[in-house]
Amino acid sequence: MESTPKKGFQGLIENWQSDVIAAVSVALIALPLSLGIALAAGAPAMAGIFSAIVGGVVTTFYRGGHISVNGPAKGVIGVILLGIVLMDDGTGQAFNYVLAAVVVSGALQMLLGILKLGRLADIFHSSVIHGILAAIGIIIFAKQIHVAMGTHSDSPSIVQNLIDAVLYLPQANPFVVVIALTGLLLLLFQSKISNRFFHWLPAPMWVIALSIPFVYAFNFFDPHTLSVFGKAYEVGPDLLLDIPDSIADSIMHPNFGKINTIEFWTTVFSMLIITSIESLAIAKAVDKIDPYKRKTDLNKDLTGIGFSTLVAGLIGGLPIIAVIIRSTVNIHNGAKTKWSNMYQGLLLLLFIVVLSPVMRQVPLCAFAILLVYTGFKLASPAVFKQMYNQGTEQLVFFIGTMILTLYTNLLVGLLGGLLLALVIHMLLANVSIPEFFKMIYRSRTKLIQRSDDSFDLKIRGIANFLGIIKIDKLVAQIPAGANVNIDLSETRLVGITYMDYLVEYLKAQRATGGKVFITGLDSHVSSSTYNRALKISFAGAGAKLSQRQKRLRNLATEKDYQYTSQVNWNTEYLKRFHFFEVRPIERKYNCLKGTYKELEVSWEIADITFNEGQTFTAETFNTTLMILTLNKKIPVFTMEKEAVLEKIFDRVMAFTGYKDIDFEMYPDFSKKFLLMGNNESEIRSFFTDEIIRFFENHQIYHIESNGEALIVFDKIKLARTDETMAFINYGKELATLLDAKTI
């Protein structure tokens, strides 16, 4: 790996080219999304642009992160809508009152950072936060679906807005709908199109660009009617984006006239909690995919984001947070330092000045469909399934919080969700209320240092989200690189948020060279097989093997392999493969190991749990893969089924120096496989006639080399026992072929 980029102005000087290139892609994504977020929040369109520019330019000079991108995000939409509704007094100053709340929440966020209270975000139950975000997704969808259909719902009720979307479907304007549907198809299928032309611009910019020809075709510039099947529909400039001629005309100032009202402070604290939690969670997520493994100073980041939010509020902007989509794009496109965030802010300013005449030709429904798509992803069936897979009680917390938020507001939803989680924890622990809180705050949890400088962290009582601050103080006493055993055997209940914290600590400590083990959960049971699921202690309970695990154990006994069903948290080696560089790995388990003795080649087949996607909407996948450790060096490459339409292959490789390598002498092979790598000459030399014929005549797997080992897997699913045997046989044939080859 390259050396870590230097900080400060020296980093700016040394890395400006790579940072500027990455910033161009980020700014192209930020432009339409920032406008769309503002419109969805009921704010002037330029409010989103101001937020993105301030998030880029101001935040960069005081921040705790290294490569994240700041600006407005979908999480603020519900908060702004809430504030406008609560403080609308008919004077036309509702958004100005909200700007005052933005300024105050920014100041309070700065204070949280200065007082080093960033870790407070960890105590909020993860399923409750997901419930809040799902409610925000439904709010976005319910509001924006009418814009995408050309209809309007006057009801203040989100649920009624959804019902109206169905009732008003026959009244939908087909000239608006056709633009929205075209945009939706682009969002759904752009990533699955192999032609590189469609990847020069990010999907949101394609949605905006391809909507403009429709505007000219239907002449949205003049008010008139168009007919379809004898029915007339109105079109005109009111369906287009309206932004002022100059940036100065867009500036709005806060009005503190409502500062002494409960509505004002409800908006402030809703804004503060949602933006702080989301920013800190995203900062930690970005750290996981930072190629240089740098860590964010969470308190400093909170202070910097708070100051930027305050500045944005003073000129008419929305609250600022770290944005996961733009941060991921930033990393994928080669950004190295924090200055890429500043460049994207400046480029955004340039774009809006240069492109403002073009942007006035974009229909509102194009922005709306971007937000409809985003809102759906926040509350899609996949999110419900993910919560269910984490435990039935997590689904209850999630749905309860979501419904409460939809029928009240974000602050009530958050507090109500936390109370619901607390009550269910009490019922599951089956102890009295006084005893329950005693087992949290007076649990006799302690840290013991041993003579060999290793540590035992003995956790007792109730280990749930209320106890995270206490455990955080204890682990802060453990030096980097120390070995730690975390013993949970004397806990009555271990919550999912607490397990999240312990696993994140385990990964962070292991990254410093320490060995960390989580033990003592053999007598605990849960409603899910998810490794971080809520667990309750029952005397006499023990881990039971599933039928699949029993078959794997029997296979190991029969063939003299090694097998363990235990979770192995050490997955650092897998990060040396491109596939897992940007997909955080949760765990490795059901590990089957063996050796092709005559070849001196070892192999391991294991189940892997990893994440794909954004922080709060990330999907969790399970797959079975084989690691084939070779006794010789081979080129670094990735090989995948050509024109694959699944998430298996990351086409970002095509833009980071990898090339699709074809063999003219073997057209069938080139049609069947997408072969990529940096060193084309070495790869062509490696893929001899025998190796090409082998791959042509065997099942198509995803195969990747890191230079000393191969990973092999098929579909993103757990393998059956017969498929595991097929892995072993496939590996042996391939290893035999490579052993006979002189590299």
Image (cartoon, rainbow, N blue to C red):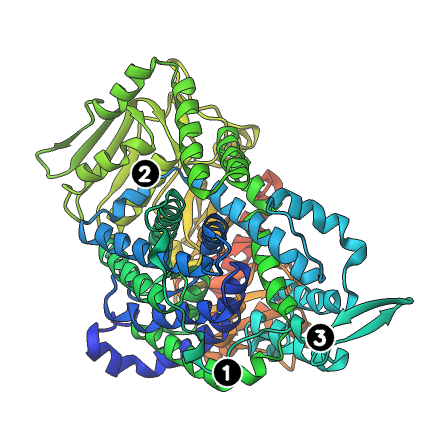
* Residue at the spot of label 3: 236
Judged from the image, the secondary structure of the residue bearing numbered disc 3 is loop
Q: Earlier in the sequence, mark 1 or mark 2?
A: 2
Residue 588, position as x, y percentages in the image: 42, 43
Task: Tell me where residue 349 appears, x and y as whole percent.
Answer: 41, 80
Residue located 51% across and 67% down the image = 33
Nearer to us of marks 3 and 2 is 3
Quadrant housing residue 524: top left
Disc marking residue 245: 1
Q: Is residue 84 left or right of 494 when viewed as pictured?
A: right
Where disc 1 sits, the SS reads loop
Look at 68% across and 57% down and name the residue there: 152
Looking at this view, is 117 or 710 the one in front? 117
Dot 3 or dot 1: first in sequence order is 3
Amino acid at dot 3: Gly
Q: Amino acid at mark 1?
A: Asp
Q: Quadrant of residue 443?
A: top left
Q: Residue 692 location, x and y as percent?
A: 60, 70
